[in-house]
Image (spheres, rainbow, N blue to C red):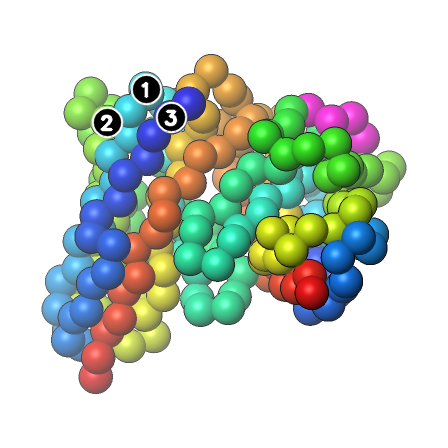
Amino acid sequence: KNEVEQSPQNLTAQEGEFITINCSYSVGISALHWLQQHPGGGIVSLFMLSSGKKKHGRLIATINIQEKHSSLHITASHPRDSAVYICAVPSGGSNYKLTFGKGTLLTVNP
Amino acid sequence: ETGVTQSPTHLIKTRGQQVTLRCSSQSGHNTVSWYQQALGQGPQFIFQYYREEENGRGNFPPRFSGLQFPNYSSELNVNALELDDSALYLCASSLGGGTTRYEQYFGPGTRLTVT
């Protein structure tokens, strides 16, 4: 089974700050998912990446396959970015099953 | 292009009862995965259906069962409900039979409360 660790568990920032959320996993993978979940809500897929870096608006995701580590960055954070951010990776030995981290609760204050 | 939809949004059931949750996959997607998310936890994989066949299963008892229909919509059935089954149930659709190559698109979830 692939163990997924996210840090920090909770993060509070002021509007405009640069945010970094980290994800480490134990077993080599072909792709990693970053997801966003608003309180009480469903999940939105932000990125799926297998190498390097992806950017979408103010969100940037990077992955280092050798170090088994990924980061999600938010530039110029805004209160509407407040949500739980979850990383997910394929379970060891499986192509169909995702293992999810426990999530990082981000609160951005105006 | 329509997104993933789930019904109902909320549901309250009594211990011992049975429940059916429904998911309509995104247009063109032939794979549906179901997840259980307990409060404060990350989602846990229940099972996946690919072209109407179960493609893989997580660590859930047989009273959790599913179906996928020819139009690729899907149902999750839970028998003999227990209090611990109270959770948000998420479905996600994708292309292909594996999550590693294709992005998953999640529905809004069904909040099940068992009393």
Nearest to the observer: residue B82 or residue A57? B82
Q: Residue at x 27, y 39 (%)?
A: A5
Query: Where A40 falls versus B41 (above or below)?
Result: below
Tag 3 secondary structure:
loop
Nearest to the observer: residue A60 or residue A90? A90
Mark seen at residue A28:
1
Q: Mark 2 or 1 closer to N-term?
A: 1
Tag 2 secondary structure:
loop
Residue type at tag 1: Gly
To which residue does mark 2 refer?
A68
Nearest to the observer: residue B57 or residue B103? B57
Do pointers 2 and 1 mark residues of a single chain? yes
Look at discs 3 and 1 and give the one toward the viewer.
Answer: 3
Badges 2 and 1: C-beta atoms under 8 Å apart?
yes
Q: Mark 3 or 1 closer to N-term?
A: 3
In-image side of A80 versus A96 (left or right): left
Q: State the image coordinates of residue A1 (x, y, percent, origin top left).
A: 42, 23
Chain to which the residue tagged by mark 1 belongs? A
For the C terminus of chain A, the quadrant is bottom left
Q: Residue at x 21, y 79 (%)?
A: A109
To which residue does mark 3 refer?
A2
Q: Quadrant of residue A80?
A: bottom left
Mark 2 to mark 1 CA distance (whole Å): 7 Å
**Which range is magenta?**
B51-55
Is residue B113 visible from the viewing direction of this image?
yes
Nearest to the observer: residue A81 or residue B111? B111
Counting other residues with Cα less than 10 Å from the Cα at mark 2, is it few (<14), some (14-19), or many (20 or more)?
A: some
Tag 1 secondary structure:
loop
